[in-house]
Amino acid sequence: MQKIFIKHTIAILTASIFLILFINYLFSRHMLENQQLTTFDIKIEQIIHTLESNQAELEMMNENLNEDYLTRAKAAAYVLDREEESEMDVAQMQYLAKLLNVDEVHYIDENGIIVLASVSKYIGMDMADHEQTSAFLVLLDNKGEDAYLIQDVQPNASEGKIMQYIGVARKEHGGFVQVGIEPKRLMEAQSRNTYDYIFSRFPTDEREEFFVVDRETGAVLGHSGSMEQSFTEECYQLDQLMQCRNGAYKKGKDGRQMYTVSRIYENVLICAVLPEEVLLRKLFHNAVRMLIYLLCVELAVILLLGYLVRRKVVDGIHRIIESLSAITDGNLDTTVDVGGNHEFEELSKGINTMVRSIINISNRTSAIIDMSGIPLAAYEYERGSEHVFATSRLGELLDISKTRVADLCRSAERFDKFIQWMTKNPMEGESDVYRINDSKYVRIHMSESPQGKLGVITDVTADIEEKTQMRYENTHDPLTELYKYGHFQKLAQELLHKMPEGTVSAVVMLDLDYFKGINDAFGHDVGDKYLQGFAAVMRAMPAEHFLTSRRSGDEFCMMIYNCADRNEVAAYLDRFYETLAENPVAMSESLTRRISASAGYACTSDANADVAQLLRRADEALYETKNKIKGTYGAYND
């Protein structure tokens, strides 16, 4: 025992010596790192100042150009207001564009269609078909004489060409005029505000690197060296750089440590790195001499401790070990009583108190869990033991009586069988979650070891209900409570695959008649009520034969399945239309209106049929029906 103690003491003292050396090293190193951090902060601030100055210059240029371009757009609108549209052609629009010194001139009518253009292939384009062009449709709703829109530089919808478009509402004829300009001057100014351009003119010291990283993608946007590098090292990774605001070491090329500093600026990180060996060239002058002095002190301390350990410690420890061995063997009545010094007496009292606490640990643990108010229960039992330790909320969480809990806890084998039965059927898609009753769900996490089993039970009812609600919102239309179109297609395809042989299914496309007129006459709130009334009739159909969905706007679709033949499909459609006629919608306090809808359907008896193709056929049948007699339905004919 004494030899082991001395051996470990030597190790501790030796470690202490090196710790002192290490602390001295850290102190000196910390000073150097603080100096470098200050240097990097100053240089990064200079980079930010350059960026902001260039950005201010760019914004001023952009503002001046926008004002100039808007003037040209207004001039184009002025010219077109005084010309007959029938007399304008592509050549005249090109002449107008050349006269105004712009690249493109378009006229868009009240329906959002390009009817005149200096580029012939743009004529007939619908502005609503693309995100870039649809932004200008707000000019159709704005009746002000000075309505205009200046769009940022971006690829155009037709060719992906970098353009800037300006739209001005026509004052007399409706619609709006749009001019397009290739922003060469602005692009040149923007190129001077790039990180590579700034870094190429920024002075750096020996082996310093400066670079910029996107905070969302982690991509390196600019580097003071070369952008041809792979940037796969740790010191270029976003998650690592976020930790370097006050300076940190990250791995660089060839595994070298790089002192790295980062600073958040808008949506990027501006970073600076320096190799560790450059930073730490002056730290190792006096380390060897200090080490020799400390080793001499260690030798003197070891000789003194050897004597004290043998006389004051070893004998008492042996007696305590003997008592602890008896307690470990299960003899909890053992009392530890070691004298000789005050410390051993206090240790003996502490061990005896600990043994008494172990005896009552089950009751204390259960009481603590109950006091916490957390819906949690735990159980534990050792192999070969009959008794099961369980906290008081076990019965509440598993929905069993206290009597039943007490009976189970008297037999570890019976308790184990009960838990296995409870965990036989977990919830689909959930880990260790089980349904107790209609309104309660619990998670049972079990851990097994050679000594026994331990389990923790928590109430997860709120989490499951929240997930169920989220799944409902992801698959159902919020206004009509019908399935969303994408989810409907998935369910319909599954129903087709499961279709019994000899049965018929049909996909139905429906469209409300005159719905736009209802919105215009009564307002969108009544229009929503009209949609909900139609959806209510769809939901009222028998669920074992109908699958219903809102496609978009006033378009709906449904699937009629498990039918004996096509006649039964038609019978269900008749039933649907009869129910629709019996449930008019109140448009106001004094006016009700019968819902009118047209439908087309396509039947199949093929379980391998494609739902998307059936929907297209039903859509064709719907189109024919609406052209013939609205408010009825028709079948698709090959």
Image: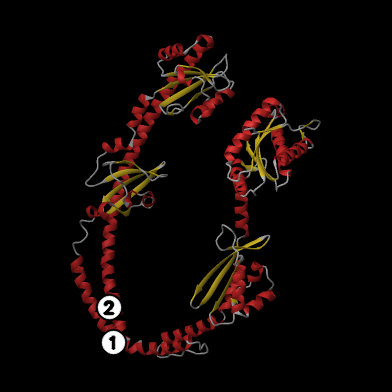
Disc 2 marks a residue whose amino acid type is Ile
Question: In the image, 28: left or right of 378?
Answer: left
Where in the figure is residue 363, as x and y percent of width and height? Answer: 60, 77
Residue at screen point 23% across, 56% down: 280
Reading the chain from its start, which is encountered first: label 2 or label 1?
A: 2
Circle 2 is placed at which residue position?
A: 10
Seen from the viewer's position, the closer of residues 77 and 350 is 77
Q: Residues within 10 Å of mark 1 (few under 14, many from 20)?
A: few
Between circles 2 and 1, the one closer to the viewer is 2
The answer, for residue 82, to whether it is visible in the render is no
From where the camera sits, is residue 281 visible?
A: yes
Quadrant in which the C terminus appears: top right
- The residue that mark 1 highlights is 307
Q: Is residue 52 above or below residue 313?
A: above
Locate residue 379: give its quadrant: bottom right
The kind of residue tagged 1 is Tyr
Residue 604 higher or lower than 2, as above or below: above
Q: Residue furthest right?
A: 590
Q: Nearer the viewer, residue 237 or 293?
A: 237
Residue 632 is situated, as x and y percent measured from the top left of the image, at: 72, 31
Residue at (61% x, 80% y) in the render: 411
Q: Looking at the picture, how far across and down is residue 436, in whole percent? A: 65, 64
- Which residue is painted at 37% across and 52% down in the image? 240
